[in-house]
Image (spheres, rainbow, N blue to C red):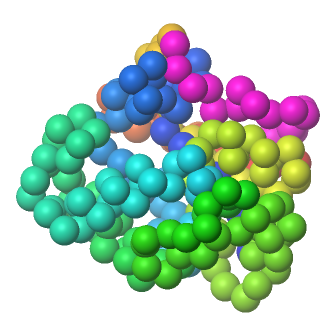
Amino acid sequence: MRKLIAAFKISVDGKTEGPEGYADWVPAWSEDYGLTPQVDACVLGGGMYPGYEQYWTAIRNEPGKPHWIGGNVPTAGERAWAEITTRMPHYVLSITMTSAQWPNTRILRGTDDIAALKEQHGKDIYLMGGAPTVAGLLDAGLVDELRLIVYPLLAGEGAALFATAKRRQELDLRTVEQLPGGLLSLTYAVG
């Protein structure tokens, strides 16, 4: 069975974004978790999808232009991920969306659809979020692994990764790596 792997860049106090609606402490949204060779599909929630589509389309179409989150020119890692996203199937978990502009994107309606996706042949699946989607899929017992890059700051106000989780989850710490700038990379098995 394919694993569903959630990966996030968070603050020490568990925030995925600040009060302005994004994690202004994250300088780049490249795939820094080591997932690219391991995954062949992405899942995200309907609330996150529009911004995701806009962000990565802009980087793919204008790789030298500063992007709307943070105003920085895309990094090499962001440009590489923008290209990968054009080929990789995306699945949007939403009960309200009826269509998606992104190529190779399918809308899934519920946790049964995610469970069926895990049963299909292929590599593992990158669960990108948003936070309520991840919490719901954790509650449903569908997330197999959690990868976090923890930034050394307290974000204060903002959206917490597990704010909407309803049940206790046991995590098994698999790896810890100290990264430059005081960041920590943590990998947990779920359950």
Q: Which region of the structure is painted magenta?
A: 157-175
Q: Give whichever of 149, 156 is nearer the camera.
A: 156
At x 78% / y 51%, what residue is drawn? 137
From what the image shows, is residue 187 above or below residue 158? Answer: below
Can you tell which quarter of the image residue 136 is in? top right
Dominant SS in magenta: loop
From what the image shows, is residue 20 above or below residue 39? Answer: above
At x 19% / y 52%, what residue is drawn? 74
At x 62% / y 53%, what residue is drawn? 45
At x 48% / y 60%, what residue is drawn? 34
Residue that sits furthest to the left in the current view? 64
For residue 118, side relative to residue 87 (left or right): right
Which quadrant does the N terminus fall into?
A: bottom right
Does the magenta run of residues contain 64? no
For residue 31, side relative to residue 126 (left or right): left
Position of residue 77 measured from the top left corner of the image (x, y, whole percent): 28, 59
Q: Is residue 172 visible?
A: no
Can you tell which quarter of the image residue 164 is in? top right
Position of residue 165 measured from the top left corner of the image (x, y, whole percent): 80, 34
Position of residue 78 measured from the top left corner of the image (x, y, whole percent): 29, 58
Counting the numbered discs, the total is 0
Q: Give whichever of 25, 150 is nearer the camera.
A: 25
Does the magenta run of residues contain 171? yes
Position of residue 160 measured from the top left corner of the image (x, y, whole percent): 62, 26
Residue that sits furthest to the bottom in the current view? 121
For residue 110, side relative to residue 126 (left or right): right
Q: Is residue 177 visible?
A: yes
